[in-house]
Amino acid sequence: MEEKKTGKRARLGGTERARGDLALFERPLFEDPSARALQRVGVVDIGSNSVRMVVFDGAARSPAYFYNEKVMAGLGQGLAETGRLNPQGRLRALSALRRFAALAEGMQLPAMSCVATAAVRDAADGPEFHAEAEAATGLKIWVIDGQEEARLSAQGVLLGWPEAEGIVCDIGGNSMELAEVNGGVVGRRVTSPLGPFRLQQLGSRKAVTAYIAAEVAKLAAEIGTSHDRIYLVGGSWRAIARLDMERRGYPMTVLHEYHMRPQSVLQTVNWIAENDIADLRARTGTSAARMDLVPLASLVLRQLVRSFHPKEIDVSSYGIREGLLYEQMPERLRRRDPLIEACRYAERTSARMPGFGKKLFAFIMPIFTGAGPGRLRMIRAACLLHDTTWRAHPDYRAEVCFENVTRANLGGLSHLERVFLGLALMHRYKNSRAGSRFEPLFKLLNDREIRDAEVLGKAMRFGAMFALKSPEEAGEFLWQPKKKVLELRLSRLGEALFGEVAEARFAALVAALGATSKVTRTGL
């Protein structure tokens, strides 16, 4: 079963994602002391618009959000006009920071990493607020410059997107930063005053568009325009991406790794301008504070597309907070595949037989001879996850599998890959997908990809019947793709396990392959 590719990237994960230095079943690094130290890490980001605390937990390379709280303080609102922090925003930010400090103490977290960005660094009363916040909370707060903000945001993208190559663009309330990423390294970085709070002070739309054009031209001159991709970081960008989904009728609402084409972005910017903001907010569930900034942010995005001419615009839910976690990772951990590390951790903590995924992978691999590295990566991930939702009610287990994967906080997983993996896991527990409430999502895959996901799921469904020890002790597959014959060679143990249900599952796998079957008994 060969992997279909389109252009430079494979549709379901290409060679750029299956790097040769990643041994997919080597010892998980979350058992290493240096990685275990990162299993509960707290960070605080004091931005111009929001103040947020995140506590990461779990597999250090692809962490789950153990705690995530945001307050839309508006600390930098009006800064461009007054030169000072918003008085009400100061009160709200201080209140939030006191709460976060108390939460950290209650969770017994090690010292949190706390950073303040454009509003605090640019305001005349920023040093005063900085000192007041530290005194009131006991937190150590680092006020970082634009270059450092750009670097940390880019590192956040690399945490979930190790192969990222292009420009990371992080928009906040009072500034916008750009950084080059290539080969896991952050390159040139630039900052600009293109945050929506600043643009609000410029008055007419004509003045705003002229200012944006001039500032983006400076950025293009400094960092160059020969970049195929722009990775968008920041709440305003995510709100625009959610509106793009709404306009297109896109069936999935996961924003991380959502891909947009330049023409689609321009159409969405025009669509935003033509529609009532309150109506758009209601349709997408965006907060009022965020939606107020969307019209101005959309003008910035339009100019970025026109000036940088990217081939693709990708949304990253990871940014400066994840960059702070990435900063603490040893290099050997950074090199690991975030998806596979997360799947390993899920198997270890949630499966009935941790370690069986590796054996299942070896058992079904003869069926997938010739699969490309991206597809092999999906097969490995599926085998690791195949038994992690066993606690769900049997009647709903198949759909729980699908929903978990398509909505999970997983890095290194495109939308197409989410659906492929989810569909494979659905078929791990259920032969038919007909009538599923998730059918609209299946349309993101072509017919070949749907068939391949079904084959993978049914191969795991059968292999799980041999879970007593190791599937290879019970039998082995011999697949003849040209003759379309799937042979199952059973050992003496396999004969005992090959009961009525196992026979039915084997027949379903053969049917999914469009093949004929052959069962031989070795007697060994």
Image: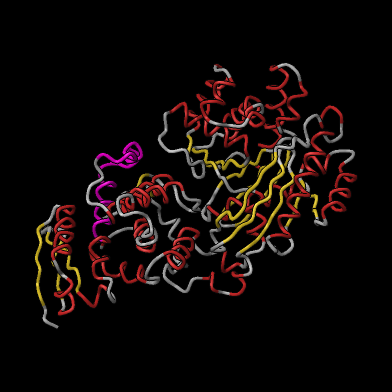
Q: How is the image coloured?
A: secondary structure
Question: Does 395 appear above or below 291?
Answer: below
Q: Is residue 270 visible?
A: yes
Q: Hey, which quadrant is residue 41 in on the image?
A: bottom right
Where is residue 9? Give x, y as percent: 41, 48
Residue 227 lies left or right of residue 89; in this view the side is left
Where is residue 169? Give x, y as percent: 63, 41
Q: Residue at x 64, y 29 (%)?
A: 297
Q: Is residue 207 magenta?
A: no
**In terms of depth relative to the viewer, which is nearer, 260 or 251?**
251
Q: Is residue 436 magenta?
A: yes
Looking at the rendered image, the quarter that the N terminus falls into is: bottom left
Residue 155 lies left or right of residue 397; in this view the side is right
Q: Residue at x 60, y 65 (%)?
A: 39
- Bounds of the magenta segment: 435-459
Where is residue 191? Give x, y as percent: 73, 41
Where is residue 146? Give x, y as percent: 75, 45
Question: What number of labels is visible?
Answer: 0
Looking at the rendered image, the quarter that the C terminus falls into is: bottom left
Check the image and name the residue furthest to the bottom. 524
Q: Residue at x 45, y 68 (%)?
A: 348
**In terms of depth relative to the viewer, which is nearer, 94 or 177?**
94
**In terms of depth relative to the viewer, which is nearer, 472 or 4?**
472
Residue 380 lies left or right of residue 216; in this view the side is left
Give the main secondary structure of the magenta stretch.
Answer: helix
Q: Is residue 373 visible?
A: no
